[in-house]
Image (cartoon, rainbow, N blue to C red):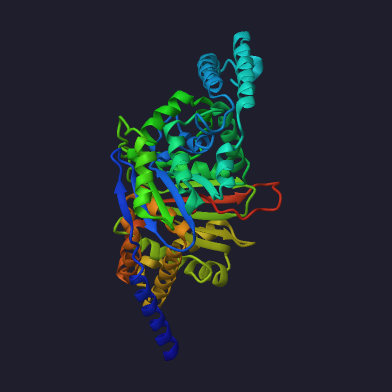
Amino acid sequence: MLHRILRSLLASLLLVATMAGQRVEVEEFILENGMKFLLIPREGDPNVAAGWISKFGSVNERPGVTGVAHLFEHMMFKGTHVIGTKDVERDLAIIEELDSLRAQIQSQRADLLEKQRLGLIEDPDDPANRSAEHSALIARFDALLEAQRELVVKDEFSQIYTTNGGSGMNAGTTNDFTIYFINVPSNKLELWFWMESDRLASPVFREFYAERDVVREERRLRTDSTPTGKLDEQLESMFWQSSPYGWPVIGWPSDLNAITRAEAMEFFDTYYAPNNLVAALVGDFDVEELKALARKYFGRLARGARPPGAVRTREVEQQAEQRLTGRAETRPQASIRFHTVPDAHVDEPALIVLSAILNGRTGRLYKSLVLEQQVAVQAGAGVDGRKYDGSFQAFGVAAPGSQPEDVEKALLAELELMGREPVGERELQKVKNQQLAGDFRKLQSKFGLMLQLLTYEALGDWRNINVFSERIQAVKPEDIQRVAKRYFTDTNRTVALYYTKEGAGPPRGRRPGRLPEGDPR
């Protein structure tokens, strides 16, 4: 036993010593227009992980225009004045006419929405309710869409990268940011600078209205057609009472039907201006040559006329427990969610360590609920620290013969124990070592490091990458007790209980709510 403890201690010391020499050295510079660049040169593999991020996510939207951040993610691959079209002049003329027709169609639809409000019609989208003028406008609109499709060079933006050795191109939208990334050969870096700056300098949101239909279909597949999608969305909306985190990243259906290109461009001009963008490159390059390319290409972007401000509406303090009970084609399950703290808050490290103690096959929740009490077949916990607010969630999927309320009771008992009894040093050190090893591995991948730099910077400051592990290692048992007592209160919790819908097919083991997969970094 003593030898095992000594070996464990020695391994911990070696790991900490190794990590201490792994501070990320970043060359940072800012163009005159406000765009920031984070550079990490690494000689060897002639490949560069390159990406940029807009500090624009669904939290920055407003009622009536939800989903626009995610829609931008789609539109940014549609090309520019020179990419993606056979005839840009004809293309732009069609876009202008489509905007005009859309405004007229919206006016007609507003009349139908008023009739629906008054109970005169059931469905404002039923063609039978449209006037002859309305139908004619839609027919003309559809004909123009078809004419535009004839001009489009499909996927030309991605094809240019692929034929020049680029790989892994993708993008993603979250509540707090939208990110674009790719791997490019070192000798094709100038292509990356031109391509990425061009889609910011001269974007053409061609097929805008057709792409809204694509997003609506994506919403149907991800939310409407999944076992618990609609319940999860309702839970999220209920949990966030005042914060704009309460609406879905993909947007509300009524907004997706109504967003205009002009409304979208207002957001683009503010949130895709260079003073709201950060780029990161990690790989084999010369720093001074890269700076020159940045000035040449991204330096031509004009600073935004209206600087993006911080989100004004913050979450109010919850006054009473909230509960949601629903039935779906899923296994019986329970989740308990608490309001906590945003990313980089002083309490976040203790909450992350606490979740690690509870989570995983060797965590307390699995041991207690699955192996010992046998009330669940799956159990876990996670922290979700966003830019302005955060949450902690514990969940469990009921075992045969158990009900969601049995899982809820067992989860609450384990959470209450975290505040009542201090965590043992050995258990604490184990999860710290696991976290440290994971952090170390993340720094070895160029692509992963690039993504981390961008997300850290979007949420606050890239320099947090160098102190995150140290803050985790500094967590003490009393810190864990303190945050458990502070945040795991009955008035601060939201409970979701899902039961299997009668007549449903084989139940699917989907977790209730939006369970974060641990710390995003």
Residue 440 rendering spot, x and y as whole percentages: 42, 68
Question: How far across and down, in percent of the image, does residue 288 sit?
Answer: 34, 52
Along the viewing direction, whichever of 428 and 318 lies nearer the viewer: 428
Residue 62's image quarter? top left
Asked if residue 264 is positioned above or below residue 279 in the image, the reply reads above
Instruction: Say which quadrant the N terminus sits in.
Output: bottom left
Q: Quadrant of the C terminus?
A: bottom left
Q: Is residue 158 above or below residue 43?
A: above
Is residue 243 visible in this depiction of the protein? no
Residue 303 shown left or right of residue 204 in the figure = left
Could you say where residue 267 lies in the image, as x and y percent from the top left? 40, 31
Furthest-bottom residue in this view: 2
The residue at 42%/74% (across/down) is 430
Q: In the rendering, at what x and y percent does residue 431 appear?
A: 42, 71
Which of 87/387 is in front? 87
Q: How many marks?
A: 0
- Residue 240 visible in the shown view: yes
Kindly indicate the quadrant of the structure image that contains residue 177.
Answer: top left
Q: Residue at x 45, y 45 (%)?
A: 190
